[in-house]
Image: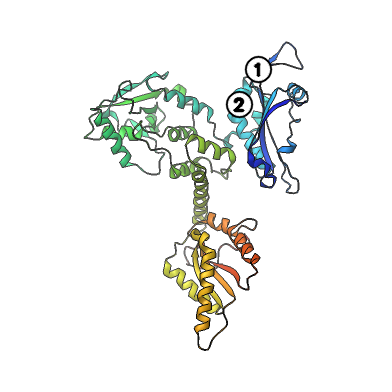
Amino acid sequence: MSSVFKKIIPKEAYDYSSYNGFLYIYRLIKDVISPTNPKVILKKGMWYLGAHGSDKPYIDCNVDDGYAESCENEDFRLLYCGTEPVFELEIFYLCKNWTEAKLEESRMLVEKRKDIINGMSFNNIKTLNLINKNESLDREPCKELINEVKKREKNKWGFSYQDKKKYTKTNYEFLQVKDKDDNTHKKDVKNLINDANGVVDLDKNPNIEPVLVFEKRGEGGRDLVVNGNVTAGAIKSKDCKAQKVPEIRIPYEENIKFNEKQYRYIGLTLNRRGKKVRRTTNVDMATKYVQDHIATDGATYNTKYNRTWIKVDWDLSTEQVNQVMTNVKDNLFKEEQTQKNKVLPDYTKEQVNDRCDELRKIFPNDIIFAASVGMIDKLPMRILEAVDKDIIEAEASIPEREPKQKVRIVMDWKQSKSNRDKFVNKVDGNWITLKRLWDNINSDITITYEEMELTVDDKKGATEIALDEDE
């Protein structure tokens, strides 16, 4: 009989070729007596977190060969090797290799460190000293504060009302977590307040959200508005009937433990406004945060851990999270090129057509047309249409000529290195997939592509292609 009573394994884990590392967690499903000390009761919910994987592609690590014997805790090893079903096993965070899985494990241990410190984990507390804390966002204290703020008038710090005339940059620093001010949102909140005749008392108006203030954390010792710029701005409007701004103030002695990475996260997570008016954190806001506070000094940002909390905490879809990571990659590339005196040209239709004309002179026997990387799904039909058009023209020409046997597509990357990388990837990129499907139909027509330069010298203009195809 196994020591595992229940297994929770995602369906995608049975596609063994899709990952080579993963995280697992064992949880006690009931109180048990310690195998090493009969006087100690190991509490229900106590857990052990681990990672398993390989950086060698020829070693196939999967959920069917889960590994847990490495735990230093003797109680866990004895229970794990026993026959009494006391554990629930959950598999999560399927990773590309061991290096990624180990990094994700470190992030999870930091987030769950309170359990480790309080003895609710089989993991060794010394492990926490070996983890680079700067690699991860410590969300636990942030979530505790967020949950307390959501209690509104029942929060432990209480609330106060400031005269709106005091809400100036002299008295407050206003944290800007959005890419730009949302004036439409501010107008909506103002109208919501005016509909309630200017009432902003938290116990009387459930549709108004209080402003969250960190005392003395702004520049020059000013109070810092972490969340609530829109509420304050709406009330400050001349035609708003409200005269006071509701606040929840976090004392300096308590807010000093939060760093900028954390309080910006708090602002974005609380970025909701009232029961009737909502503006949640969007892709642009999330992109700015990841770029400014996670993807710094070469830190890995596109991780399972970060993807998960962004999706859950900021209510973004998987597609939106993918877009955030794509945006960050492109933005970092743009910054890198700027430092190299390179620019990412945004080609006009005329410039793309000129490039096609140049290639037609070089390759007079090829069918040549331009395509945007954003229209990849239409490429097969574009190729067929171009071939069909050439066949008709060949038959109508005087004298009649043979149809051309090669299609050459001029690709415009639309200033996106991410799109280019996805297209040229040698394993499963858009081009290799299209080429394989095309070759499988045994056509006499061959296909290839040329590139519009992704980056060009900022001083000299277009030179040779900055990135070769094998990159």
Q: Which residue is mark 2?
A: 113
Look at the picture and state if 188 lies above or below 463. above
Q: Position of residue 178 (x, y in %)?
A: 40, 41
Distance between the alpha carbons at the discs numbered 2 and 1: 17 Å
Q: Which residue is mark 1?
A: 43
> Mark 2 packing: few (<14 Cα in 10 Å), some, or many (20+)?
many
Look at the picture and state if 134 lies above or below 456. above
Note whether residue 1 is visible. Answer: yes
Q: Quadrant of residue 383?
A: bottom right
Q: What residue lies at 50% left-to-right and 75% top-to-bottom?
A: 389
Look at the picture and state if 100 lies above or below 202. below
Q: Secondary structure at mark 1?
A: loop
Where is the N terminus found, in terms of image quarters? top right
Q: Position of residue 244 (x, y in %)?
A: 27, 26
> Mark 1 packing: few (<14 Cα in 10 Å), some, or many (20+)?
some
* Chosen colour scheme: rainbow
